[in-house]
Image (cartoon, helix red, strand yellow):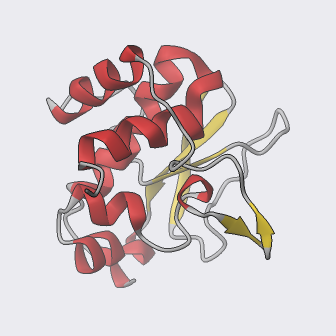
């Protein structure tokens, strides 16, 4: 039996942001829900408001991949066992809550440095909005809506 979207979401939070604490996980959950609720661009076109499609969209989350660059990826959502805190944060996000600063953010990444790039991803469809713990968060630019 396939995993429910809620279960996949909890596993994604554990995999992508467990070390970021509750606020960091809530920020990542906010981005995921922003993609579900995107009003245009790639995320609306490809995922059509479907949480499962957002979580499993190819090449969006390293944790959804079982291999990365041909190398097995042991840290993936299929190997995660979420704790109650992960489900609680998922339920919080599913109730349309957001972390301040992530209002329209569609991307996040950990630059492994104290600086966040001005634009992300490479095509400059996102502009820096805020940093929460180790992750940088990016709001869509007008260019995103042409994707």
Work out whether residue 2 or residue 5 is closer to the camera in this orientation and state it: 2
Q: Quadrant of residue 143?
A: bottom left
Q: Position of residue 75 (x, y in %)?
A: 67, 46
- The residue furthest left is 95
Q: Quadrant of residue 59?
A: bottom right
Q: As drawn, is 67 to the left or to the right of 33?
A: right
Q: Position of residue 47 (x, y in %)?
A: 26, 71
Q: Residue at x 25, y 80 (%)?
A: 45
Q: As drawn, is 24 to the left or to the right of 31?
A: right
Can residue 131 be seen here?
no
Q: As drawn, is 89 to the left or to the right of 107?
A: left
- The residue furthest front is 1
- In the image, residue 68 sits, relative to residue 128, either above or below, namely below
- The residue furthest right is 113
- The residue furthest bottom is 146
Q: Residue at x 47, y 18 (%)?
A: 23
Q: Residue at x 31, y 57 (%)?
A: 35
Q: Position of residue 112 (x, y in %)?
A: 83, 40
- In the image, residue 10 sits, relative to residue 21, either above or below, namely below
Work out whether residue 118 or residue 106 is closer to the camera in this orientation and state it: 106
Q: Residue at x 52, y 32 (%)?
A: 14
Q: Position of residue 10 (x, y in %)?
A: 38, 35
- In the image, residue 66 sits, relative to residue 87, either above or below, namely below
Q: Quadrant of residue 110?
A: top right
- In the image, residue 80 sits, relative to residue 76, either above or below, namely above
Can residue 10 be seen here?
yes
Work out whether residue 126 or residue 42 is closer to the camera in this orientation and state it: 42
Task: Classify the position of the N terminus by image quarter.
Answer: bottom left
């Amino acid at each position: 039996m396939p995993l429910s979207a809620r279960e996949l979401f909890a596993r994604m939070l554990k995999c992508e942001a467990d070390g970021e604490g509750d606020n960091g996980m809530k920020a990542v959950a906010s981005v995921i829900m922003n993609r579900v609720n995107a009003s245009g661009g790639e995320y609306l076109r490809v995922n059509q408001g479907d949480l499962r499609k957002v979580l499993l969209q190819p090449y969006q989350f390293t944790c959804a991949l079982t291999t990365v660059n041909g190398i097995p990826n042991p840290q993936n959502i299929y190997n995660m066992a979420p704790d109650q805190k992960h489900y609680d944060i998922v339920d919080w996000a599913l109730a349309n809550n957001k972390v301040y600063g992530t209002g329209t953010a569609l991307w996040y990444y950990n630059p492994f440095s104290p600086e966040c790039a001005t634009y992300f991803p490479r095509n400059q469809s996102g502009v820096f909005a805020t940093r929460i713990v180790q992750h940088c968060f990016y709001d869509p630019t007008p260019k995103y809506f042409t994707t």
